[in-house]
Image: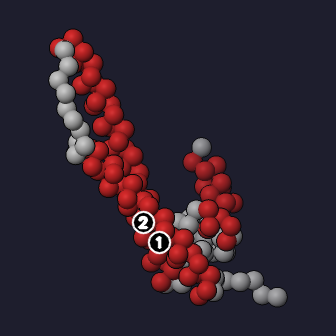
Amino acid sequence: MAEKTRYSDAELEEFRAIILEKLELAKRDYENLKDSLMNKDNDDQDTSPTYKVLEEGANTLAKEETMRLAQRQMKFINDLQAALVRIENKTYGICKVTGKLIPAERLRAVPHATMSIEAKQASKKKRR
């Protein structure tokens, strides 16, 4: 029996549904992070001068961490949107290194994956 070279249209629709659900949640999370950065729900109360400097430092660290999370979330959103494009092109689920199909179990867990586990591990070893 010949090895499968791409997922069927029905399988691609299953993956599309998974991606759209994750995309909706990711966008909601991103908006919450953005709101947090813009202090939309911040009830700023003045504290004594002794603690003000410490509090400002802690606030700066918290904002930097929130910004990193927002950037990471935006990358995730972009990766999910790129996966939707690959579904449209019917190239979704094909490993960009080996050219073979990425197992469906991996795609259900990491729907924006572009490499099989083996290819990903091999690329990590090369970077070390």
User: Would residue 92 be found to the left or right of residue 5 on screen?
Assistant: left
Q: CA distance from mark 2 to mark 1?
A: 6 Å
Total marks shown come to 2
Q: Nearer the viewer, residue 55 or 107?
A: 55
The percent position of residue 53, horizontal first and vertical second, equals 22, 18
Q: Is residue 61 above or below residue 7?
A: above
Q: Is residue 113 above or below residue 69?
A: below
The percent position of residue 112, horizontal first and vertical second, equals 52, 66
Q: Residues within 10 Å of mark 1 (few under 14, many from 20)?
A: some
Type of amino acid at the residue the image marks with label 1: Leu
Looking at this view, name the residue that lies furthest to the right.
Answer: 1
Q: Is residue 41 above or below residue 24?
A: above
Q: Residues within 10 Å of mark 2 (few under 14, many from 20)?
A: few
Q: Quadrant of residue 111?
A: bottom right
Instruction: Name the image quarter holding the N terminus.
Output: bottom right
Q: Secondary structure at mark 1?
A: helix
Q: Are marks 2 and 1 in contact (CB under 8 Å)?
A: yes
> Would you name the residue on which mark 2 appears?
24
Type of amino acid at the residue the image marks with label 2: Glu
Q: Quadrant of residue 116?
A: bottom right
Residue ID at (49%, 84%): 89
The numbered dot on residue 20 is: 1
Q: Secondary structure at mark 2?
A: helix
Observer able to see residue 13: yes
User: Would residue 8 be found to the left or right of residue 67 on screen?
Assistant: right
Residue ID at (60%, 55%): 123
